[in-house]
Image (cartoon, rainbow, N blue to C red):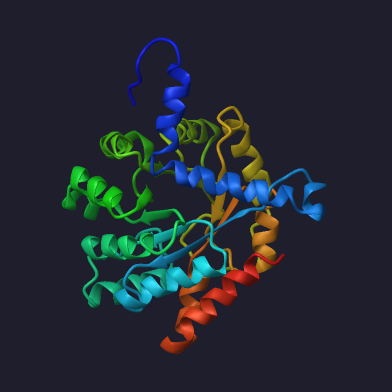
Amino acid sequence: MQTTNGKGKGSIKQNITNILPASRITRAFEQARDEQYRSPIHSAQGKGRGVLIPYFMCGYPSAEQSTQLVLAAVAGGADIVELGMPFSDPLADGATIQHAGHVALERGMTINGCMEIARQVATQCAVPLILMGYYNPVLAYGLERFCQTAAASGVCGFIIPDLPPEEALPLQQIAYQYGLALIFLAPPTATDERIAQIVKAAASGPGGFLYCVSLSGVTGSRTALPTHLRDFIARVRGYTKDYHFPLAVGFGLSTPEHIAEVTSYAEGAVVGSALVNLIDQHEESEQTTAVQQYIESLRQK
């Protein structure tokens, strides 16, 4: 992002940054932090409330219903929403998310359909939206077209699980031109050198956060969090502290206790497979209420 030289350069750059779509992600983390500071119980802990980030597969169980489910999550207190783009070969997804993606594809969901869902949600709420999906469909769609359409549809950033930092530059450059965040994943198996590389790439753009994967393997709800998770987050924190960059934890989270624990040492928590399971357990007429109540329960701890 270019700024003019001379007096006031820093303030001009700051003003430009504040209007970028990605800056809405940053503000969501800041608002959650400030909200908790106003709580007498948690202000004594000196930390903010964690950001809650639910994941929904676009087109599951239908295009219209997935839009209503996202809005129900927002009504329940979601701070940021991930919108999944279905793909035929989702390597990082467990059986639950794979099932949702296959159903969405069978019912005709496309990248354009995902953009339309984002647009519909964005016209009805101000919660930041992040598209999450695999790189091949994005490449086939066209990087410039993808970023341009996303920005016009109210999207604030992307998560591309199969795109490592060393291969991300083409998408990264175009995304940043449109003020969109590119959010990278850091797995617990990463070496210190690899974590440093991922953090450097993540911190190079506007807004965003680092997505810390809680476990090795694929997505899916778990009954207990991995014992190494707190130490892993502390290790990552050693590389992000100079950037003041928020961390969010995903994969395997499903209960209020999980969210409470994770957000005691990370700034955000992602819930995905548990929501798909919840949707499957209810008739369509009951799904929005069930989702709203579930999101409310995750924020009560």
Classify 15 as above or below 22. above
Nearest the camera: 14 or 148? 14
> Residue shown at 46%/80% (left/top)?
279
**Residue occupying image coordinates x 51% and y 31%:** 196
- Residue 157 x, y percent position in the rendering: 38, 47
Give the residue at x 46% y 46%: 24
Residue 87 seen in the figure: no
Residue at image position (60%, 48%) is: 31
Q: Quick one: 36 or 186, which is closer to the camera?
A: 36
Is residue 300 at all visible to an observer of this figure?
Answer: yes
Is 250 or 18 nearer to us in this picture?
18
Q: Residue furthest front?
A: 7
Q: Is residue 171 above or below residue 212?
A: above
Placement of 2 over or under 99, stated as above or below: above
- Give the left or right position of residue 41, taking residue 273 as reference: right
Q: Quadrant of the N terminus?
A: top left
Residue 118 in the figure: left or right of residue 185: left
Quarter the C terminus occupies? bottom right
Q: Position of residue 255 (x, y in %)?
A: 64, 69
Q: Where does the image place residue 62, in percent across and percent down from the top left?
A: 32, 78
Residue 296 image offset from top left, x and y in percent: 61, 70
Toward the top, the furthest residue is 6
Asked whether, in this view, residue 235 is left or right of residue 287, the answer is right
Q: Quadrant of residue 114?
A: bottom left
Q: How many marks?
A: 0
